[in-house]
Image (cartoon, grey):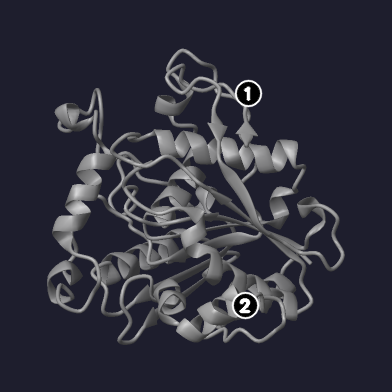
Amino acid sequence: MVNTTSPVNPEFGQLRIADYFLFRSIREPDTPAESDLVIFYLHGGGYLTGQPGHYLLFLLRLAEYVLAQDISVSIFTLDYSLAPESSYPTQLAESAAAYAYLVNEKQIPPGKILLAGDSAGGHLALSLLVHLQNPNPLVLGRETSQPNSPPKPGAGLLLLSPWLSLHHQSKSYVTNAHTDILTGPFLHECAQRFLRGHLESFNDPETFDPNSPYLEFLHPSPATDWEAVLPSRIWVFAGADEIFADAITQWVESVKKSKKSTTNIEFQLGPGREHDWQWVETQLNETAKKKFLNGQVGDGILEFGETAKIGEYIVQKLRDGVVL
């Protein structure tokens, strides 16, 4: 369990959060801080469903691929609170506490941490990065002086089919309505439940602004300084047949325009692919599941599939950069 004493809104009290080092390399490092790479993964599920165990096979396949390239890796995941029982900004407060735990208590250098998330987890990852740059008053409490936030993750940012806007629908919501596993009505319901408690003040910017830079990443108000917020290495994956396709493409282009040449952003729009296809692939791969259940993970026999492409991007950029 994580027990943080960081100043937070009194509503949250002393945060105790369920966390998991879902994978820790046993080749050489004795602690996660000694790993070459620590992945901090935030799961998807529309803020309504999901937990780290649902991503076990996907993350273990990613870890096995990275290990095969002689890079030691640990994977930390957060079992954050779900809506509607826990609404915004609870999840942001918990992820900020968990990141501070990694840096301050586990003594993991921020330069070794890669922040990653899919779907709503991608939304939460971006919210966390904005918060690290400019702490959210709803988390800190308006009367609390802003503490020194830990530096942003230096190993990079990995986004898989990120949910970038809770209330703006791009054209692909319509054009890909029958080719994706997600639907607009479902996402609307997710957003309503996630923002429960703020809906009465939805149109009152003095109380709550749905275009807040902690919530809105396509049209934030005020505008987000992506140069200051984002790490220097970014990987973004989306499916050409998913309803988020246009929004993700738009966001990548806006980031490229706002970032300096020192920032490297890799974007893959998978032809014929739906939302979160890399994770979906692991859920449908019955052979890989059987090998996992038979205790064969770590024997170098899992088919990596699309997960390998994620690992290839990460390994290449880590070797080109300063992490290793």
Which residue is depicted at the point 42% across and 17% down? 142
Crowd rating for badge 2 (residues with CA inside 10 Å; few <14, some 14–19, many 20+): few
Q: Is residue 246 left or right of residue 2?
A: left
The residue lying toward the viewer, choosing from 307 and 18, is: 18
**How many marks can you see?**
2
User: Does 42 sit above or below residue 96?
Assistant: below
Please state which of residues 53 and 116 is positioned toward the viewer in this rendering: 53
Residue that protrudes farthest toward the front in the picture: 294
Q: Image point 86% across, 55% down: which residue?
A: 30
Quadrant assignment for the C terminus: bottom right
Give how far across and how far down residue 108 sits, in percent. Answer: 75, 47
In the image, is 156 to the left or to the right of 137? right
Image spot of residue 87 (x, y percent) = 32, 35
Pointer 1: residues within 10 angstroms few (<14), some, or many (20+)? Answer: few
In the drawing, does residue 173 fall left or right of residue 82?
Answer: left
Residue on which disc 1 sits = 5
Depth check: give the residue in front, 258 or 197. Answer: 197
Residue 196 seen anywhere in this rendered image of the structure? yes
Dot 2 falls on a residue whose secondary structure is: loop
Q: Amino acid at mark 1?
A: Thr
* Amino acid on which disc 2 is placed: Asn
Q: Which residue is mark 2?
A: 294
Rendered residue at 23%/74% (across/down): 180
Q: Residue at x 59, y 40 (%)?
A: 98
Question: Going from the N terminus, do you reach mark 2 or mark 1 first?
Answer: 1
Residue 303 picture location, percent across and down: 57, 87
Local SS, label 1: loop
Q: Is residue 130 above or below residue 276?
A: above
